[in-house]
């Protein structure tokens, strides 16, 4: 913790304290002298000697802004550290073992940039949300072989110079001037103390790193312009080597799509310039930006002066998490949907689960994360990533219990920015889903108080079980506007109550489990009384309201099946769901016995469908079904991302229904595929806490041949529902069966 209330003078204000490993640290933030500086980003330098044999050297570091660290010329590969938090509440402190980099004479270099602290945030175009001055705290503990320790911490003996990075912004890009002269560290001015007190929280999840490199294809070239296609929409930047005359310039612009004439389409980026620029030194200069990223597939490089480029690559940035999930089947459209959802996740797992990586937004929308979290956890090890995101939500919950629509939260409260059903319920959905995958009971314990406050807000805005909260989003970006918004909100009221009950049950608290079961039953009764009409028709009559009401348990398959089927058939067998409904649509169709229809929907290639976007060249999931159509071209650029993951939440259906990997809180994994002759085969695997489970099935001669293989320690059961089992062989770790 930080001891607050110590600031009596400026000198005292510059020092705060932090308890770490049973010792009290003195913390001094440092800044450069703002009265004697250039506009280039600052580099903080510290020289130190190691004259004895060092057993270990650990650095703890944080920043108001984001940092890049080099020691003796070796660079720490993490990007945008210490990550985005509500800096008014807490800041991450990061730990690095530097032992292997030590020499007798050592030089530590730390460059600071605005990042989320003082850079522009979100579509509001607001900068300096948390502060204007970038500051650094670092502490090195040298543990020697003789048992002694030496501590080197940020203070007024550190030097500050100017980097060759002129400016850097997430939205606008990075400018590097390689003509910037190399500085004599010993002649540089000293750092200044900076008064700042904030709580430190250990950085506890995987960092952002380079996870892949993509080679480009040149599709246009003239004397000064080069246009590149990387074949994949992704988040990251270009790196290359430039040779040319001193003062020559190279500018790189980024885009997701092309105009009809082959030029890059920038309109959907809104105010984000997404432009990187370098000014040449006259020698070989390698461009490798440190403090920006872009969402793009295409790039345009413009040369000013005599310049030769080489070694051009697209660098993919993402959270450095393990992707253990796999899926493949006989249909290339379905494979494309899975691949696009995977790339959407990689592109938007940049410190937090963002909505998009390209335009002037890139916010941690709770609704997007809520609908996609199960898909993400099937795809990859998101354990620590979502623990961090939940902490961000906790930090910004409002006094009345409203959950922000995105986290970190930094804009005024309104009906669309906090407490929105379908978005606010992330505080219940994500912890419960996290437990299904990772069995960490502490995540439930940590989030329950906030989930209770969220439900208390619902209860305080309900009457006889009927929720009265206004919902400005509904089934966001659904194809057809339906009058189902209030019914959707009522479904999420019951969903949150049900999940609260289940989480208390996991903790063994039967009293509270029963309490929230009663809340759920009240919400269900109100839904049926207000929204379910004669013969099972639901107000709104949309695919979303039927799928969601069935998934929440408000209605039975039998009573809604005719209306649910009609909601698909009247659209010529195509979907109309938006961000909310798309997660529930395919599982609900399987539940009412229309499995083949679910498969046909995900294979569909006519608009609106996942397959239609693939036919238009999509390599990621789009924000909206009509982002681009052959009839109308591009949708309004005000909100038209071509790299979202929300509509890719169907990925969980591929794991849980096509492969049949069902997760339970109180039982083993159950393998129960929703078979369909719409596929000739399907195969894939899921990496559990205890190992991998792999499922394969194929359809031949009107029979399904199933093989399940699990690593030792992965317990599983099976349920082929009411299908006839023609043969079955089972050992502890394998199962083979033929079913009809």
Image: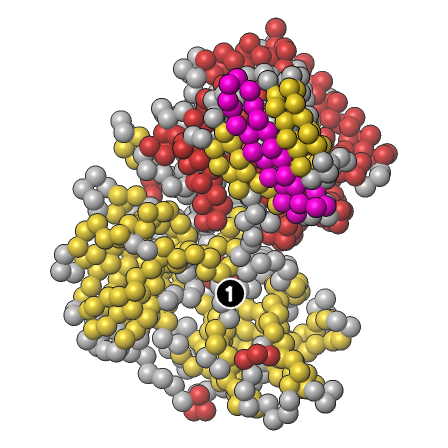
Residue wearing tag 1: 78
Q: Main secondary structure of the magenta part?
A: strand
Which residue reaches farthest left? 223
Work out whether 186 lies above or below 625: below
Classify residue 541 as left or right of residue 246.
right
Q: Which residues are magenta?
A: 691-714
Where's residue 3, x and y in %?
A: 72, 70
Inspect the magenta stretch and tell me whether residue 176 lies in it. Answer: no
Task: Please say whether residue 693 is one of the residues in the magenta stretch.
Answer: yes
Name the foreground residue: 219 vs 253: 219
Q: Toward the viewer: 438 or 628?
A: 438
Percent from the top left, x then y, of residue 341? Answer: 47, 40
Which quadrant would the N terminus be assigned to in this image? bottom right
The answer to whether 557 appears left or right of 134 in the picture is right
| Quarter of the figure with the C terminus | top right
Q: Name the quadrant containing residue 177.
A: bottom left
Q: Is residue 278 visible?
A: no
Residue 538 place in picture, x, y as percent: 58, 14
- Assess disc 1: are there few (<14), some (14-19) or many (≥20) residues with their C-alpha within 10 Å of its C-alpha: some
Between 113 and 284, which is closer to the camera in this rendering? 284
Q: Position of residue 526 (x, y in %)?
A: 69, 19
Residue placed furthest toward the top: 534
281 with respect to 715 (left or right): left
Q: Who's the residue at 26% across and 66% down the image?
A: 310
Q: What residue is drawn where x is 30% and y is 61%?
A: 312
Q: Is residue 224 above or below residue 334?
A: below
Q: Residue at x 36, y 34 (%)?
A: 614
């Amino acid at each position: 913790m930080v001891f607050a209330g110590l600031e009596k003078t400026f000198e005292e204000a510059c020092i705060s304290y932090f308890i770490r490993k049973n010792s009290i640290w003195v913390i001094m933030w440092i800044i450069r002298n703002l009265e004697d500086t250039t506009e280039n980003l600052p580099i903080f330098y510290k020289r130190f000697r190691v004259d004895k044999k060092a057993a270990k050297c650990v650095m703890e570091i944080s920043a108001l802004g984001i940092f890049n660290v080099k020691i003796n010329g070796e660079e720490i590969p993490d990007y945008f550290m210490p990550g985005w938090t509500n800096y008014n509440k807490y800041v991450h402190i990061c730990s690095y073992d530097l032992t292997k980099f030590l020499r007798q004479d050592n030089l530590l270099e730390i460059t600071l940039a605005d990042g989320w602290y003082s850079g522009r945030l979100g579509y509001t175009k607001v900068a300096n949300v948390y502060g204007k001055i970038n500051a650094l705290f670092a502490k090195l503990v040298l543990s020697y072989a003789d048992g002694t320790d030496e501590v080197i911490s940020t203070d007024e003996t550190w030097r500050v110079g100017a980097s060759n990075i002129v400016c850097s912004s997430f939205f606008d890009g990075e400018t590097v001037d390689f003509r910037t002269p190399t500085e004599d560290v010993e002649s540089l001015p000293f750092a200044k103390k900076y008064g700042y007190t904030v709580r430190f929280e250990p950085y506890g999840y995987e960092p952002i790193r380079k996870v892949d490199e993509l080679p480009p294809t040149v599709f246009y070239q003239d004397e000064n312009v080069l246009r590149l296609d990387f074949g994949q929409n992704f988040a990251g930047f270009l790196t290359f080597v430039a040779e040319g005359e001193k003062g020559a310039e190279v500018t790189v612009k980024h885009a997701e799509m092309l105009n009809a004439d082959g030029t890059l389409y920038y309109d959907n980026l809104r105010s984000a310039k997404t432009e990187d620029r370098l000014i040449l030194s006259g020698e070989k200069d390698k461009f490798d930006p440190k403090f920006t990223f872009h969402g793009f597939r295409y790039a345009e490089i413009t040369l000013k002066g005599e310049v030769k480029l080489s070694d051009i690559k697209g660098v993919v940035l993402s959270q450095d998490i393990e992707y253990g999930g796999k899926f493949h089947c006989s249909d290339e459209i379905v494979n494309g949907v899975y691949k696009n959802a995977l790339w959407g996740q990689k592109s938007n797992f940049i410190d937090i689960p963002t909505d998009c990586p390209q335009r002037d937004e890139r916010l941690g929308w709770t609704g997007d994360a809520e609908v996609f979290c199960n898909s993400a956890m099937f795809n990859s090890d998101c354990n620590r990533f979502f623990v961090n995101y939940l902490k961000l939500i906790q930090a910004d919950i409002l006094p009345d219990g409203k959950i922000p629509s995105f986290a970190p939260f930094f804009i005024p409260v309104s009906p669309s920015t906090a407490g929105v059903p379908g978005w606010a319920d992330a505080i219940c959905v994500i912890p419960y889903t996290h437990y299904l995958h990772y069995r960490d009971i502490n995540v439930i314990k940590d989030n329950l108080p906030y989930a209770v406050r969220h439900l208390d807000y619902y209860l305080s805005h309900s009457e006889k079980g009927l929720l009265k909260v206004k919902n400005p989003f509904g089934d966001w970006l659904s194809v057809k506007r339906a009058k189902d918004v209030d019914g959707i909100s009522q479904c999420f009221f019951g969903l949150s109550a049900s999940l609260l009950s289940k989480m208390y049950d996991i903790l063994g608290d039967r009293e509270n489990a029963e309490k929230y079961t009663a809340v759920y039953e009240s919400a269900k009764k109100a839904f049926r009384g207000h929204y379910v009409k004669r013969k099972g028709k639901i107000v709104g009559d949309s695919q979303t309201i039927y799928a969601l009401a069935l998934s929440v348990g408000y209605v039975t398959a039998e009573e809604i099946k005719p209306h649910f089927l009609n909601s698909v058939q009247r659209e010529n067998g195509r979907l109309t769901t938006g961000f909310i409904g798309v997660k529930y649509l395919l599982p609900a169709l399987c539940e009412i016995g229309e499995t083949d229809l679910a498969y046909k929907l995900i294979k569909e290639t006519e608009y609106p469908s996942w397959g239609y976007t693939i036919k238009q060249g999509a390599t990621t999931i789009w924000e909206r079904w009509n982002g681009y159509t052959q009839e109308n071209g591009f949708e309004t650029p005000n909100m038209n991302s071509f790299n979202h993951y929300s509509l890719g939440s169907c990925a969980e259906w591929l794991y849980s229904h096509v492969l049949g990997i069902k997760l339970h809180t109180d039982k083993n994994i159950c393998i129960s595929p929703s078979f369909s002759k719409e596929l000739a085969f399907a195969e894939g695997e899921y990496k559990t806490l205890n190992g991998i489970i792999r499922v394969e099935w194929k359809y031949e001669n009107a029979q399904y041949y199933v093989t399940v293989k699990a690593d030792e320690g992965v317990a599983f059961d099976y349920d082929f529902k009411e299908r006839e089992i023609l043969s079955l062989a089972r050992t502890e770790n394998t199962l083979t069966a033929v079913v009809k």
